[in-house]
Amino acid sequence: MQPVVRHLIVCEDIRRGNSPEQFTLVNVITRIRSLDPVPFPLLYREMCVLAMCTECRGQGRVQIQIVEEESDEPCRESHV
């Protein structure tokens, strides 16, 4: 059975709680938009991604890949 991503949330930080099931998302990012006169390239110092999956058990790894819209080529990848 293949894992299914139920939620993929981007934020500035994820803080752990008292147990593994508890965490706090800091400054959830709902859209990325530059306010500069020349909007691109827009660089974020750091972003965190929370991936909540179903159809799986135990621990696993998630890899995030950002793809250039026009060329359909990957431009960034998370560590595995």
Image (spheres, helix red, strand yellow):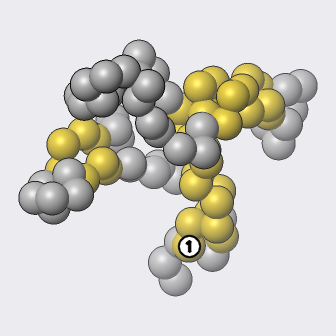
Q: Tell which of 80 and 58 is nearer to you.
A: 80
Outermost residue on the top side: it is 45
Q: Position of residue 48 (x, y in %)?
A: 54, 32
Measuring 15% from the left and 59% from the top, which residue is drawn there?
Answer: 70
Q: Position of residue 55 (x, y in %)?
A: 63, 75
- Local packing at callout 1 (Cα closer than 10 Å; few below 14, some 14-19, many 20+) is few
- How many numbered marks are there? 1
Q: Position of residue 77 (x, y in %)?
A: 28, 41
Q: Quadrant of residue 39?
A: top left
Measuring 38% from the left and 48% from the top, which residue is drawn there?
Answer: 64
Q: Is residue 15 left or right of residue 37?
A: right
Q: Is residue 45 left or right of residue 39?
A: right
Where is 13 relative to 62, above or below?
Answer: above
Measuring 44% from the left and 25% from the top, which residue is drawn there?
Answer: 35
Q: Quadrant of the C terminus?
A: top left
Outermost residue on the bottom side: it is 1
Residue 58 visible: no
- Amino acid on which disc 1 is placed: Val
Q: Quadrant of residue 4?
A: bottom right
Circle 1 is placed at which residue position? 4
Residue 47 visible: yes
Q: Tell which of 29 and 60 is nearer to you.
A: 29
Q: Secondary structure at mark 1?
A: strand
Q: Position of residue 72 (x, y in %)?
A: 15, 61
Q: Quadrant of residue 8?
A: bottom right
Outermost residue on the right side: it is 18
